[in-house]
Image: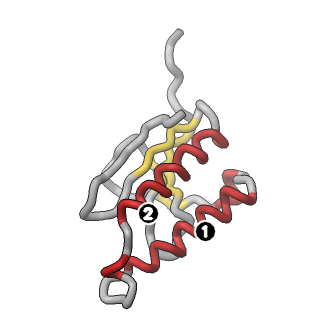
Amino acid sequence: MTPTTPKLYLRVWPEWGSSGIWELARPLQPEAGKMVDYESLELPAGLRQDFEAWIEWFWDAVPGSDTADAFDCRAFCVEGLQLAHRLKAVVGPDIHVEFEGCQGHLILRTPDAP
């Protein structure tokens, strides 16, 4: 069976004030891409709320903030990777999903996570 080309390429990546989901032109591109809103993907309410909470958590990493030094990047990245897996389960096999973690730390990518 020949694999099909994905209809859409998505990246889960944190950015302050974003949805945390980005549309890409191609897999693993270096640019962030275009932010995707939750409505366009018809995400279930629970997944949307978890993405919103994850992005809210990212505000703790703002350089110079009272919480920046205590920010647990590893735990944050683990949560982000779990969100990427959940997103992939929702959008299905025809959509590529990858994850990029905290800048300056380990970058995890899961093209087509199960």
Disc 1 and disc 2: Cα gap in Å? 13 Å
* Residue nearer the viewer, 74 or 91: 74
Report the residue marked by disc 2: 76
In this view, which residue lies farthest toward the top?
A: 1
Q: Amino acid at mark 1?
A: Glu
* Residue nearer the viewer, 73 or 25: 73
Coloring basis for residues: secondary structure
| Helix, strand or loop status at disc 2 | helix
Mark 2, Cα crowd under 10 Å, few <14 / some 14-19 / many 20+, is: some
Picture disc at residue 110: none
Picture disc at residue 52: 1
In the displayed structure, 68 sits above or below 103; it is below
For the C terminus, the quadrant is: top right
* Residue nearer the viewer, 63 or 10: 63
In this view, which residue lies farthest toward the left?
A: 104
Q: Earlier in the sequence, mark 1 or mark 2?
A: 1
Q: Amino acid at mark 2?
A: Phe
Q: Position of residue 105 (x, y in %)?
A: 27, 60
